Image (spheres, rainbow, N blue to C red):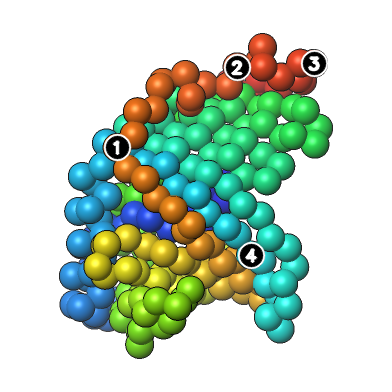
Amino acid sequence: MKNLLFSILILTGISTFAQPKGMGKNDTDAKKILDQVSAKFKSFKTVTAKFNLKIENAAGKVQGTKSGVVNLKGTKYRINVTGQEIYSDGNTTWTYDKSSNEVQINKVERSATTITPQKMFTNFYDKDFLYKTNPDVKIGGKMLQEIELTPIDKSKPFFKVLVAVDKASKTIRQTKVFEKNGNRYIYSVISLVPNTALPDALFVFDTKKYPKVEVVDLR
């Protein structure tokens, strides 16, 4: 679940972070772009984004593809991706596996290290990354600004993240996560619609809609 949240939700929102002491300098141009992306996201009351995921090995061979939708509203979120649904009303999280018809229920952790979509959109990499601008890249026929993020903590399972930003709309269009094992996770935003009416019930798992679902309550 943590890998899913990290990779998906880096797509459409980023904010600034304090420069770690003694870790070198960040690119001021990259900071300006990230600040703009952050400000744009923070202006949204709700977000609905459709995305595609492509998984490649070190040789660039496609290992699999998935598609999904993420909805955000305040501290609430819902993620639908091929084979899995994740719900959270801000206090409780439900993770539903379609193949086994099983849902796991957990309390929302509120520690500084807990990964949530809201952190991913606002300050997920606070003090955790160095960043710089790379040359523009052409994706889907459009030139985008590429920003490279490098984790300061070298024990992370990934060593680099490339973020492609549409500077006109101030939104992220693609994210590529490079894992140390050679795998690459490429998430592309298909559409992003802000400020639509999202009922609170959307973020709560309703067992009545899933006949014979097995409930594993870990709270």
State the residue in front, 116 or 137.
137
Q: Is residue 124 visible?
A: no
* Residue drawn at (40%, 71%) of the image: 164
Other-residue count near label 4 (Cα within 10 Å), few / some / many at <14 / 14–19 / ≥20: some
Other-residue count near label 1 (Cα within 10 Å), few / some / many at <14 / 14–19 / ≥20: few
Work out which residue is located at the far top of the displayed protein and give it.
208
- Cβ–Cβ below 8 Å for labels 1 and 4? no
Q: Which residue is mark 1?
A: 195
- Amino acid type at mark 1: Asn
Real-space Cα separation, disc 2 to disc 3, in angstroms: 12 Å
Mark earlier in primary sequence (2, 4): 4
Real-space Cα separation, disc 1 to disc 2, in angstroms: 24 Å
Q: Which residue is mark 3?
A: 212
* Residue drawn at (39%, 27%) of the image: 198
* Residue drawn at (51%, 70%) of the image: 176
State the residue in front, 115 or 71.
71
- Amino acid type at mark 4: Lys
Question: In which quadrant is the C terminus drawn?
Answer: top right
Residue 54 marker: 4
Q: Is residue 80 visible?
A: yes
Number of dots carrying numbers = 4
Closest to the camera, between mark 1 and mark 3, is 1
Real-space Cα separation, disc 1 to disc 3, in angstroms: 35 Å
Helix, strand or loop under label 4: strand
Q: Which residue is mark 2?
A: 206
Work out which residue is located at the far front of the displayed protein and give it.
141
Instruction: Work out whether 92 lies above or below 180.
Output: above
Real-space Cα separation, disc 3 to disc 4, in angstroms: 32 Å
* Residue drawn at (27%, 50%) of the image: 41
